[in-house]
Amino acid sequence: MLSDRVRMNAYFNSIFQNKHHFQGKTVLDVGAGSGILAIWSAQAGARKVYAVEATKMSEHARALVKANNLEDVVEVIEGSMEEVTLPEKVDVIISEWMGYFLLRESMFDSVICARDRWLKPMGMMYPSHARMWVAPIRSGSVDKKINDYEDAMDDWYHFTNETKSKYGVDMSVLKKSFSEEQRKYYLQTSLWSNLHPHQVIGTAAVVKEIDCLTVTVNDILEVRSNLSSSITLENTRLCGFGGWFDVHFRGRKEDPAQQEIELTTAPSIDNGTHWGQQVFLMHPPIRVSEGDGLNVSFLMKRSMENHRLLEVELGCEIRQCSGTILPSFNKKFYIE
Amino acid sequence: MLSDRVRMNAYFNSIFQNKHHFQGKTVLDVGAGSGILAIWSAQAGARKVYAVEATKMSEHARALVKANNLEDVVEVIEGSMEEVTLPEKVDVIISEWMGYFLLRESMFDSVICARDRWLKPMGMMYPSHARMWVAPIRSGSVDKKINDYEDAMDDWYHFTNETKSKYGVDMSVLKKSFSEEQRKYYLQTSLWSNLHPHQVIGTAAVVKEIDCLTVTVNDILEVRSNLSSSITLENTRLCGFGGWFDVHFRGRKEDPAQQEIELTTAPSIDNGTHWGQQVFLMHPPIRVSEGDGLNVSFLMKRSMENHRLLEVELGCEIRQCSGTILPSFNKKFYIE
């Protein structure tokens, strides 16, 4: 949290430019970490702030609260959100719960749980809304990753030849699973990336909108969407898709923010965040040009083996300006 | 295992240059991985080989055994060594159990367990012996790591100043724990390194000798040693210590190897292994010269939080040629 300026500013502004949401109110900070959001909430005038943190980081939070003379307002509670008991319901739940591409780590589950258990009927969520975005991109990484994969397979052939001739063991039966493993590692694992806006070669589309006040865990177990995008660059290569998110601080309809704040992790020259973007490479790249249309099918699920990780299926059909429709393709990715 | 030539050759030679230890014998391969040691044992003439592997890698091992037409000899068993039951006791236990600096990962525990449960009274261990070594070294890494640490602390001062002036929160109370964390990360975590032999500036000393036939888990929970080393280089810097290991394949006293094989992970120009060496940096470096004597105290324990990781305490007293004794120092390290 602390070393990401864009993130710090967004939360700071969301609180101090909307003090009326905090003055005299009770606040719950979910996954408080060092407790900075709880401290700001108190400084903005909250009557009481509960800062729930599951790890030993809670000790830092407690020290920080004390050093800033806020022990009377901020109560740090070490425990998991699913298990702690608060002495009262709260007016505001604030949390910095977002993972890579919004949902990696699945920490939002705890925020939803906190909301269902502890938010007053007319309470509000900070942030109040979240969106996931996808856009077509170009990227030199695709060439590098294909080379890396091919190098790994070359090494494998060399190695199995040697193992056969020098060590007398035929390893060729393992080729398929080795190749699948390398393919997954080099070509099907999404990349953390800090994309330059120029790498985005078409219109970005929203794949998921979340109202933090009403969404259920069930709503985010699977994210499924069909979306359209148009290529906006003359004669370029479609190398894959970039995925990012934004969140908004809008208060609630009956008591909106005086100043709406946006925190976006879209490609940016000056305002990159530690979240960056997730890049899903398509190989081989496909030549596209301005006006070409993409129909994209997007499906994201939690990994069966580890529900904090994600699996993505991206399908794409390209309608060229000329009217020609290229054969559609479908790829599977892992966000690890 | 497979991509490290030095390792492959040592095991291959230990088996095929000592076929008399395998011909007509029963063999247990502990932590078999892809099963290569089991296959070699069978090819060398074993009557029966049990290949125990706890992970899904056992499926690869099974495929490999079948592809090499050894299903009648090699039986792959998926399970933990502590829990599986074999139909008979064995003549030989073979295993590639060594972790960084020999004991990281603590896989040797399973080999000892296998030996106590399944090795015949006159059976033998492959490898039969292991040693841990320590030697004084010079290394430019120490300067880099000190710089990294100082950069991190500079960032911290900048960050806390800004957090105070711009965001109104005093973080200075966390300085101590931040500094300790950075110190641990940059200065107290041992480094994997592929040392050039020229970086070793004094005599190497054995800190632990293990007879695989008799050692108990208790014997390796803690490794404690006082050792001496002499600086062998004119006017250089003592920047820390390098740690490595070797293992030997000697059979047993009553039935020795025809050809003793050594697998060493000592600093080497041409025969580096994936184990490399662990480097423990001392800062600031100390100027030493040929003939200076070091008295080193070495203590290695398993980490309380994770018994697969290790903690090392290294103390050192330097007796200069001139007779002057420099103030001794003592440092704590983490092998992670």
Image: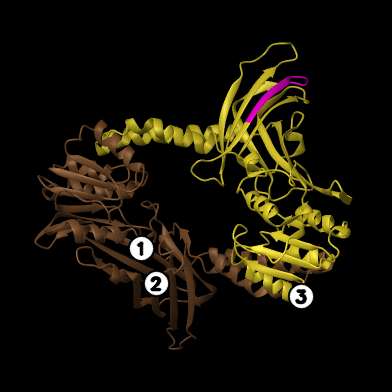
Chain colours: A brown, B yellow
Evaluate if marks 2 and 3 touch, with contact meaning CB atoms under 8 Å apart.
Answer: no
Q: Which portion, as a residue range, is magenta? A: B289-298
> Helix or strand or loop: what does disc 3 sit on?
loop
Regarding residue A234, the answer to whether it shows in the image is: yes
Q: Chain of mark 2?
A: A
Q: Are marks 1 and 3 on the same chain?
A: no
Evaluate if marks 1 and 2 touch, with contact meaning CB atoms under 8 Å apart.
Answer: yes
Evaluate if marks 1 and 3 touch, with contact meaning CB atoms under 8 Å apart.
Answer: no
Q: What residue sits right under mark 1 in the picture?
A: A103
State whether residue A90 is above or below residue B217: below
The numbered mark, 1 or 2, whose residue comes first in the sequence reads: 1
Q: Chain of mark 1?
A: A
Q: Chain of mark 3?
A: B
The location of residue A263, given as percent across then percent down, is: 29, 55
> Helix or strand or loop: what does disc 1 sit on?
loop
Q: Are marks 1 and 2 on the same chain?
A: yes
The location of residue A272, given as percent across then percent down, is: 38, 53
Q: What residue sits right under mark 2 in the picture?
A: A300
Q: What residue sits right under mark 3 in the picture?
A: B72
State whether residue B175 is above or below residue B257: above
Count of numbered tags: 3
The location of residue A257, given as percent across then percent down, is: 14, 55
Work out how far the residue at label 1 is from the one at label 2, CA to CA, in angstroms: 10 Å
Q: Nearer the viewer, residue B330 or A91?
A: B330
The location of residue B208, given as percent across then percent down, is: 71, 36
Q: Which label number is shown at residue A14?
A: none
Q: Main secondary structure of the magenta part?
A: strand
